Amino acid sequence: MQNKFNHTYTMMLKGLISNSMSEKVFDLFDEMTIKLDSFTLTVLFNTCPRGKCSSIEIAQNLYRFLHDHDKVTYAAMINGFGLNGMDHEAAELYKTVPMNLRDEITHSCVLNTYSHSGLLDKARIIFNEIPVKTVKIITVMIACLSRLFLFDGAQKLLDEYEKTNMVSFVKYMALLYGLRNSRNRILSEKIYNRMKSLFLNQKENLLSGAILLSNIYSSIGEHQLSNDFRFDQKKKN
């Protein structure tokens, strides 16, 4: 029955937050006689409009309202702070996460926060402290380096990982996204050709890579080349 009530409260709170009715949210808090769960917090925090201080205050109060914090609530809060440019708050909260609750989700959230804020040194410190670097964590760090146009470092990390692990398409896409933003045609073509040789049978995935490369051509004014390349890749698939 508690799950049913939680769902009802979640929908009510979500509607209030979406309409920036923060006072009503806190009024509803006072009326509630059950404990909110981590799912509720995650849904509500994702509802908070980016950059609105009142919504962040609501989320922080929701967080305090929970008696038991788990991996989901920590990750939701860290991610929410990151989305709103509150890297200091995200970092401070991350420090309070018990070691047994730190996993690839909480690690990825704080790395993403530092990445979007351009705080590479802090991201490196967190990355180096992570005992088990999963595919997702490696991908986030590659995206972090690529976002800052540090492609040598991103490629080095990619190459080091592949010495002892299977190749992963998503890591190459993270690198290619950064290259798109830098409009680096030569390196983009090099990475895409490498992807074609490694993932020959993943035609649908390769098409997404081809679209990124065609966007790079367009961004440097090579519109005809972009159209021809995209048409050619679609025909092959």
Image: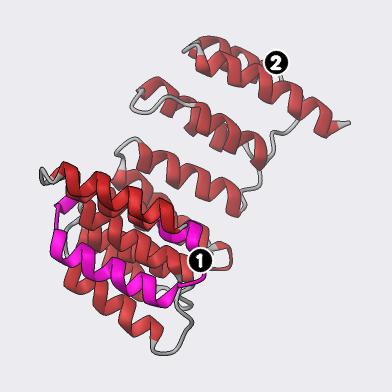
Callout 1–callout 2 Cβ contact below 8 Å: no
Q: Which residues are magenta?
A: 181-208
Please state which of residues 198 and 229 is positioned toward the viewer in this rendering: 229
**Magenta stretch: dominant secondary structure:** helix
Is residue 90 in the magenta section?
no
Q: Amino acid at mark 2?
A: Glu
In the depicted structure, whether residue 51 falls above or below residue 230: above
Mark 1 surroundings: few (<14), some (14-19) or many (≥20) residues within 10 A: few
Q: Residue 86 placed where, x, y %? A: 31, 40
Q: Residue 120 placed where, x, y %? A: 21, 61
What residue did someone put label 1 on?
Answer: 202
| Secondary structure state at the residue bearing disc 1 | loop
Q: Residue 180 placed where, x, y %? A: 22, 52
What residue did someone put label 2 on?
Answer: 31
Quarter location, residue 26: top right
Q: Would residue 61 be seen by someone viewing this image from the given angle?
A: no
Q: Amino acid at mark 1?
A: Gln
Is residue 188 in the magenta section?
yes
The structure residue drawn at horizontal position 67% and vertical position 25%, both measured from the top left corner, is 10
Please state which of residues 76 and 201 is positioned toward the viewer in this rendering: 201
Farthest bottom residue? 164
User: Is residue 237 found left or right of 84 in the rendered image?
Assistant: right
